[in-house]
């Protein structure tokens, strides 16, 4: 049985520094942060009145490639369930932990009846992992 995947790595950069570097690299490949104004979760929670500890530092970065997403969703709107791609960066043990969850072919096929989509999505996942590695490098 194939399972979904969690890509995990770390960097000595702060979550904010990592996020900035990731977005710089992603921009060169046509990606944007769909939630750029809200990816610093401490700021986002505080803006809604939540009490957040000073040391809480989590960035949820939603990556999107608008031209590819527009074409893909116009081809099959059912694909939307798998479109949000989040990279998490958070402080722990004096470094920034980075996580990216992505789906295996079987899960993709179970969620979306679309023979062409799993291969396309797998390529996007590999691109995101390469961007994470580049941004995490010190």
Image: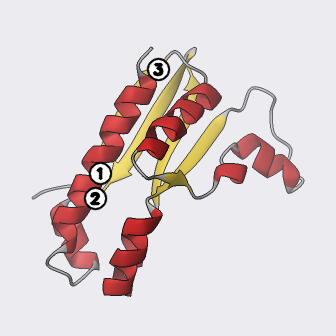
**Figure check: 55 above or below 69:** above
Label 2: which secondary element:
loop
Residue at 55%, 19% in the rendered image:
13
Quarter of the rendering containing residue 59: top right
Quadrant showing the C terminus: top left
Q: Please report whichever mark, 1 or 2, sits nearer to the chain's N-terminal start.
A: 2
Point out residue 4 in the picture as x, y percentages from the top left corner: 25, 55
Residue named by callout 3: 11
Q: Taking 53 as reference, is 14 left or right? A: left
- Cβ atoms at labels 2 and 3 below 8 Å apart: no
Residue 4 appearing in the image: no
Q: CA distance from mark 1 to mark 2?
A: 9 Å
Q: Please report whichever mark, 2 or 3, sits nearer to the chain's N-terminal start.
A: 3
Judging depth in this view, the residue of 53 and 48 nearest the camera is 48
Point out residue 7 in the picture as x, y percentages from the top left corner: 32, 39
Q: Taking 105 as reference, is 53 left or right? A: right
Residue named by callout 2: 103
**Figure check: 8 above or below 119:** above
Residue named by callout 1: 125
Label 1: which secondary element:
helix
Q: Please report whichever mark, 3 or 1, sits nearer to the chain's N-terminal start.
A: 3
Q: CA distance from mark 2 to mark 3?
A: 24 Å
């Amino acid at each position: 049985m194939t399972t979904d995947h969690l890509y995990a790595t770390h960097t000595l950069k702060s979550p904010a520094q990592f996020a900035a570097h990731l977005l710089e690299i992603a921009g060169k490949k046509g990606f944007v942060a769909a939630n750029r104004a809200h990816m610093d979760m401490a700021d986002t929670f505080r803006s809604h009145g939540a009490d957040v500890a000073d040391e809480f530092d989590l960035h949820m970065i939603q990556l999107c490639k608008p031209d590819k997403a527009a074409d893909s969703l116009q081809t099959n709107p059912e694909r939307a369930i798998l479109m949000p791609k989040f990279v998490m960066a958070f402080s722990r043990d004096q470094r920034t932990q980075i996580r990216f969850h992505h789906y295996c072919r079987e899960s993709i096929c179970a969620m979306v009846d679309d023979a062409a989509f799993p291969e396309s999505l797998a390529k996007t996942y590999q691109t995101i992992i390469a961007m994470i590695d580049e941004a995490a490098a010190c």
